[in-house]
Structures are given as C-alpha cells and as structure tokens.
Amino acid sequence: MGGIGKTTLAQFAYNNDGVKKHFDERIWVCVSDPFDEFKIARAIIEALKRDSSKDLVEFNSLMQHIQECVEGKKFFLVLDDVWNEDYYKWEPFYKCLKNGLHGSKILITTRKDKVARTMRSINVISVNELSEIECWSVFEQLAFFDMSKEECEKLEIIGRQIVRKCKGLPLAAKTIASLLQSRNTEKEWQNILESQIWELEEVERGLLVPLLLSYNELPSKVKQCFTYCAIFPKNYDMRKEELIELWMAQGYLSEKGPKEMEDNGEEYFNILASRSFFQAFYKGYDGEIYNCKMHDIVHDFAQYLCSNGCLTVEIHSGEESTISSFGETKILHLMLTLHRGASVPIPIWDNVKGLQGLRSLLVESGEYSWSNEVLPQVFDKLTCLRALKLEVCEQWLYTNYIKEIPTNIEKLLHLKYLSLWGQKKIEKLPETLCELYNLERLDVSWCVKLRELPQGIGKLRKLMYLHNVGTDSLRSLPVGIGELIRLRGVRKFVVGGGYDRACSLRPLKKLNLLRDCRIRGLGDVSDAGEARRAELEKKKSLVELGLHFDRLRDGDEEQAGRRENEEDEDERLLQALGPPPNLQKLRIHEYRGRRNVVPRNWIMSLTNLRLLSLNWWRNCEHLPPLGKLQSLEYLEIKGMESMNRVGNEFLGVESNTDGSSVIAFPKLKELRFDNMEELEEWDFGTAIKGEIIIMPRLSSLSIDDCPKLKALSDHLLQKTMLQRLEIYGCPILEERCRKETGEDWPKIRHIPDIHIV
C-alpha cells in the first residue's frame, strides 16, 4: 500500500548514526517504474565514486565498474520503490554486488509481496497501518502546532474522529493535519469531518480523500500550480526556480500590488509544501528550498485531477510509435524524455490533432539528431506554446546536439519560456527569436559554443530572466540589453571592454528591477567613471551580485587595452561600483587589489549580507575585517595565492578594545577555506583585550587543499558549536587530527560529523 511509511522508515535506517559508522558506503537509489537498469547502475556508481560513470556506455561496463567500486567495502544499499518482478533483470546487480565485504546489506521497499519474493529477501518486514493512537500522534503534532492548550482541548474530539477516517495511513494523517493547521474553529473542523468527499467511491479510500480535501481548500491559482506538476515523471527532481518560472509562463502567477510574480510563485510553492503536496526537499545552507519531489500517490492524485491535460511520455529505442497512442486526446502540457537510441517520430505532428493546442512542450534528451526535421514542424504547428524546453541530459553519452535553431521560431508568438540548456553545438541564435515579444525567460546555460546573442535582443521588452551561465564562448552582450527594463536576472552580464556593438557597464543604470546579476569581464574595464554610471548603489532590488575581475577579450594584450596597473585599477573600480543597499549574496572573484582589499564603504554598507565568496585574489596577503558583517551566515575563501597567515585582522576587532564584549561573525554558520596553498598559520592570538566572542553559531568548517597549514585555531575547535568538520588535502592537519592518535584529536572528538581524507 502506498503512503504507509515504507520510504520514511528506510530513511530513518539510512540516516541512523550507528548505520553511518558501521558501513563504509551508503547508497540510496529510487528505482520506481518504469524499470531502467542503466539509470539504476549509474545511480549506484555516482554514490560510490562521483563522475566515474561518464565514459561508460555499455551495461556490462557499468556492472564491472560497480564490482570494482564495492570490492573490499562493506556497503548499505537501499533500493526504494521497486516494482519490477523479473529476477533476471536484477541478477546482474546481485552478481557484481557480491564483491562487497561480508556484512553488506541491501534494503528494498516495495508495495508488492511478489517483488519481495522475487528479490529473494531474507527478512521481509510488513509495514502495517498505524494504530489509532499512533495515527493521532502524527496528526496532533501538525494540526495543533502553535495552538494554545484551550484550543487543542476544544478541537480534540472532532480531531480524533477525523483521524479514524485516515485509516492508519501516516501520509493521510499528515496531509489532513497540514490542512487543519490554518483552521482553529470547531465549525471549520466539523466541515472537514462531515465532507461528502469521504464517501466518494472513485477515489482510493483512505489516502486520496485527505488529499482531495486539502486540494479543495487551496486558492484557485494554487490549484493550477499543483496540477501542472503532473507533467513531470514520478520521482522527478523539481527545481523550485524552474517550477515557478513555468507557472509564470502559463499565466498562473499574477502581480498583486507591489508584489512581483516570482514572489507570488514562492508563496504558492510554500503553500503546497506546507500542505504536504511536496516532499524530499533539498535545502541550501540558509534553509531555503532549492529542489523537491512529489510522493507517487500525490503524483497519481495530480494526474487524476488534470484528466490527461498533463502527460509525461518516456520513449526508449524502438518505441517511436508510443507517442501517437493518445490520438484525439486534448493534451495541454507534454513532457518527453528520450532514452538511449530513441528519437521523436517525424510524422506525429501531422497526425496528432490533440497536440495542436499544446501550451508546454518539455523535452529532456541526450540525443537530438531528429531536431533538423522535427523542430521546423514544431514551430509551424504548435503555435500555442507558452513553454518550450529542449534540454540535454546525460551529456557524456551522446554527441548529437541541436546545431541551430530554425528561423521560423518567430511563429511561436505566445512563447514565454525557452530553455536550450546544455546544447553544446549552438553558436548563435537567429535574429527572428527577437520577434517573440512575449518571451519572459531565455535559458542558454551551458551552451558552451554560443558566441553571440541576437543584436535585436532589445526588442524582447518583456524578458525577465537571461540564464547564460557556462557560456564560455560568449565574450560580450549586445548593447540592446540596456533596453530590457523588466530584467530581473542575468547570470553572466559580460562587459565587452571595447568590442564593437558590445555592452559596457553603463546599460546597468536602466535595469532597476535586477535581483540577481553576475558581472564578467571587469578585468577589461579601466574607466572607473563607467562603473559609477552603472549606479549599482541605487539598485534596491538587487539581492545577489557577482563581480568577476576576469579578462574575456581575445587577441593581443596591448591592443586589447590591458591596464598598466591592474592592482590600482581593480581597487578604484570596486570603490566606484558601490554596494547595493539590500545585498544578501556577494561573490568577488579574481580581484587583484593589494592595499585597500575591500573598500570601507562596502564593509560598512553590507548590513544584510548572508553569503560571501572571495575567490582567487592573487595579491591579497591579509583578509579584510569580515567579522564586522553582522548578518553573514556563509563564508568561502578560496585561492588566495599570497596569503600565509589568518589572524586578528580577519575578525574586524581593534586591538585597543576598551574591555567591552565584542562578537565577531555573530551569525556565521558555515566557513570554507579552499586551495590556500601558502597558508601556514591560523591563529586569532591572545593580544586583544576584553571579552571576544568569535563565531558563536559556527556549525560547519571545511578546510580543503591547504597543504602547508600547520594547525587550526583552538578557539574554533573548542569554543564553537561545530557539528561538522571536513579536512581534505591537508597532510599536516590530517596527521594532527587523526582519530585517537592525533595531537588535536582530543580537541575535535566531540564534533558529531568528522570527515578527514
């Protein structure tokens, strides 16, 4: 039975501290349906040895690699949500996994008894429904959260009657409790208890009823957002940012007063997450959700609601006719996943009337040899499209990519979302793309050969997001970029530095709605006045900024305008750029300043900064006084070639303190030092007078590739709340921190999670 807690129980075992210590390797693979032995094999290999399966195409090669990876290791493998009953498909896995050490374990979750028998399970554990007492415990934790004792007592009788209707299913109890969390009157709870939905026969009893009740209470716009998720396959890893942008493309998010559409999307996402429609969240250092999944039962429910309006189709080699099977059915949103050797059958766009009104076409494939013939037909016939995704997956397996976008893309006048992520062969986009005046999002990330964007890009007046990270060949942006006054995000704002028809810093002045901007090519800019005219300090919406002092221009250095004194120029340029007032995330890379490493106006103004990354500052000998940043939570220092010591200057605490208590880095949670090849000493010393509190909230410390570092600061090891310590590529530290025998082991043994390699 689904929703009974099998995966949750397996997760408890997988994450148990005793299990972590007992096994050399832990591997989690979501198998699901349809069965894909290649996908399972790669998931096992990636968990054991990341990126080592890239060059392996044949199944036997994958099996051989798994056998080599597990040799001499005691592993714990979880195969979650297994449906396939064919023993012979599993047999190759058993043979290669036997190479692991005695005591290795495989845990399988499945809804089918026959699968358990087929897999020759030694110890079968049947997960039964919760007792009424247990189900009540799950329910009350959520439903009564943040309620007073009097309110809980008033609602308990009705609540217990509702729990009985959940029939012992934890997912049902959790879902209905999440719904009731925002309701605190007896009438509202009674309405849920007496709803006729509990009596519906066409809905699977016990589980989908609570989902339907919760769904019916959603605002209409949020309902649309939820059912749209049925377009994705089961167990699909949904990126929150992409999901919100797809909702925007379909018109599900409207601006309400001063609130932006993406803010409404964030609100809708949080509503669905709080009602248990989403799960398996991947969160960043700051607790922000980046990815999530849907439970299989919830996915089935979404498909039930949208009545085939959303469809996901997987095409394997030799299955080209599959897509034509939905004939006259009216499909609004379609996702195609093309596996090895598969291709889109060319005639389908003529034969399938049900696709004429298609609003979303999302394609994920590593094979696009069919694109030359199919794409012109797509652009001719699917003129209602709002979202088009032609992304590359499993890039290392294939070499056939889209080489050019047909010029008749201009016919997709309603298109708002276009993604060409990972299309390595595209060198330029057609000028006709600039006729798509409704386009809001253009993603050309990892189009590594893309040399230029259309010169007429300024005509895309509704464009809000230009995602172009990983476009290594892109050396400039068109000057028309400054006309895109609705632009919220540019992942790579390339400063041309003198190229004809290329963008400079000045167009930034008009882009007052920018939220996220990464400026590249600052190493080619020598005019500080140009930086001042960008008026970054007036950009109140800008919360994430990257400043890259790299040089992107080709050709003779002297002709390219190489700056005579790049150290002074970088310092003047950073001073002139000025910090935006509401900045939360800042990355400054390849900066060459020496004396005034970070201008005082930056340090004093970054009152809201939560993330800071300083990478590859080759002239920096002393760190700036970053301890003064009162809101900083995450700090990364990387590649400081000239730095050999970290001392009190890093804290931002003056040596003549008057004796009062001072806190340096009051909110810092995670600190990373990486690739500091000359760093030898890290000592905050004892010369400072008065009570100094340093990094009181630090929970994670990572030291990578610092081969000369002799020791860590005693203060960090003994007087912080460290929960995780990572040391890689630091031979001296590794010896000092060696388990049981190292000189510093007594200082770190209290830390729960220690990784030393």
Image (tube, grey):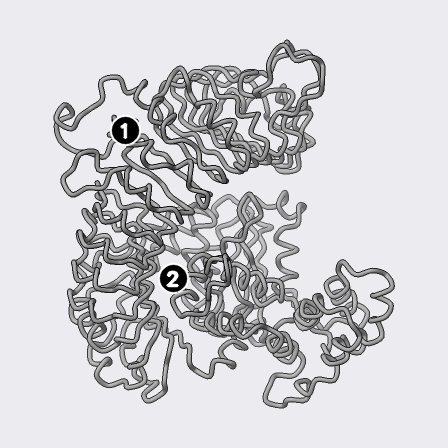
Q: Please rate how many residues cluster around mark 2, counting C-alpha atoms within 10 Å: few if below 14, some from 14 to 19, many from 20.
A: some
Q: Residue at x 21, y 51 (%)?
A: 453
**How far apart are the alpha carbons under marks 1 and 2?**
45 Å
Q: Nearer the viewer, residue 79 or 269?
A: 269
Q: Nearer the viewer, mark 1 or mark 2?
A: 1
Q: Residue at x 63, y 21 (%)?
A: 744
Label drawn at residue 38: 2
Q: Please rate how many residues cluster around mark 1, counting C-alpha atoms within 10 Å: few if below 14, some from 14 to 19, many from 20.
A: many
Q: Is residue 629 above or below residue 209?
A: above
Instruction: Residue 468: give x, y in percent of width and height.
Output: 30, 49
Q: Residue at x 45, y 15 (%)?
A: 644
Q: Residue at x 61, y 83 (%)?
A: 204
Q: Is residue 75 above or below residue 441?
A: above
> Residue 58 lies in what quarter of the image?
bottom left
Q: Secondary structure at mark 1?
A: helix
Q: Secondary structure at mark 2?
A: helix
Q: Is residue 176 above or below residue 42?
A: below
Dot 1 amino acid type: Gly
Instruction: Residue 143: give x, y in percent of width and height.
Output: 74, 66
* Residue 226 appears in the picture as rendered: yes
Q: Nearer the viewer, residue 537 or 562?
A: 537
List the residue tagged with mark 1: 523
For residue 302, side relative to residue 589 (left or right): right
Q: Nearer the viewer, residue 84 or 429?
A: 429
Q: Quadrant of the N terminus?
A: bottom right
Q: Is residue 461 above or below residue 449?
A: below
For residue 633, side relative to residue 454 (left or right): right
Dot 2 amino acid type: Phe
Instruction: Residue 316: give x, y in percent of width and height.
Output: 32, 71
- The mark nearer the N terminus, 1 or 2, is 2
For residue 212, side relative to residue 40 (left or right): right
